[in-house]
Image (cartoon, helix red, strand yellow):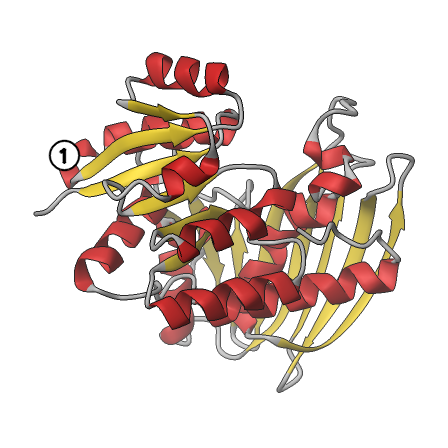
Amino acid sequence: MPPIRWGIFGTGRMAAVMAEELRRLEPQGARLVAVASRDRARATGFAARLGIGAAHASYAELAHDRSIDVIYIATPPSEHHAHMILCLESGRSVVCEKPFTTDAAQALEVIQLARRRGLFLMEALWTRFLPAAAALRRLLTEDAIGRPQLLIGGGAFIPAPDPGHYLFSPHLGGGVLLDAGVYLVSLASMLLGRPRRVHASGDVGAHGVDDHDCFILDQDGGARALLYVSLRARRAPDLELLGDAGRILVGAPVFRPTKLVVSRPSRDEEVLELPIEGSGYGYQLLAAMAALRAGRRETAEMPLDDTHSIMTTLDEIRRQIAAPDPPSG
């Protein structure tokens, strides 16, 4: 099995998590070769701390490193578009942290470039690759709850105030929708398909980013998703999918579920325990490596057309709640 040689853009928390996960996947052929940052000291310190062989003082240096097969982008959301363009134009395949970009136009530009260059590209929406997501897709294929009618749920959390964190910065692609709401929209797309109409209500808070959002996604055929996400209250995020012959509860936290409860009339509840190996981020990395070895340009779990559709939905929600325009990238 040929190794897949990885590079990482960024030295923050997610970059460290991915570096550790790639190290855990070395028996499956993952090789973390290099890291890049705009700050040489940060790159060097990160590489020394995590046992990475090369540290680059610019993203362009790593993008042009021919020893790299694929680059994981773990920079702030406002940088994703430019960094993906840099990598793809340099001939490197890309896995990019969610949110993929800050708007649908950016997403489409990146996707079209990857397709023109014949390079692998994937949004790292890790939830889609977890055992629970695979089980959900199987249950729907088997008509376990009949025809889906409603998807209901969401979550709320009150983060520690940190004006320097991207979550609170409109210039870095912050706001609760891009940070947490993207999970809900992505799962709704996976379970119900792309919405034909969006109804949204929300608020922009004191930091200039959306912090309290509710939205309804209308699907062809009459199914609807009723979802919310907020920085003003606390509730563990979960989802319940209601069909005309039963329902499925996706246990909290919905971004990393390990349990599904299937309820159907005149039958005992079925509880599916779906444990996760490691941090859970390894599933998406394994899927990316399998696709690269097979010569595929995207994954079945997170198709690029879905990524673009999800960003289009997020754009419409932001438009309706008058969230600030994202950075142009």
Q: Which residue: 51% across, 62% down?
A: 110
* Label 1 crowd (10 A; few <14 / some 14-19 / many >=20): few
**Number of numbered discs visible in the structure rendering:** 1
Q: Is residue 265 above or below residue 26?
A: below
Q: Which residue: 45% across, 30% down?
A: 15
Q: Is residue 270 visible?
A: no
Examine the image and state in which quarter residue 280 appears. Answer: top left
Front residue (pair 213, 138): 213
Query: Element under label 1?
Result: helix
Indicate the position of residue 151 as horizontal and vertical percent values: 63, 64
Q: Which residue: 71% across, 54% down?
A: 328
Examine the image and state in which quarter residue 157 appears. Answer: top right
User: Which residue lies under the disc numbered 1?
Assistant: 27
Indicate the position of residue 50 as horizontal and vertical percent values: 33, 18
Front residue (pair 232, 107): 107
Say whether residue 160 is left or right of residue 51. right
Residue furthest to the right in view is: 206
Examine the image and state in which quarter residue 148 appears. Answer: bottom right
Residue furthest to the left in view is: 1
Indicate the position of residue 123 as horizontal and vertical percent values: 47, 54
Q: Is residue 193 above or below residue 52?
A: below
Say whether residue 172 is left or right of residue 57. right
Residue furthest to the bottom in view is: 221
Q: Which residue: 76% across, 67% down?
A: 316
Front residue (pair 292, 160): 292
Say whether residue 234 is left or right of residue 20. right
Say whether residue 255 is left or right of residue 87. right
Three-letter residue code for mark 1:
Pro
Q: Is residue 105 visible?
A: yes
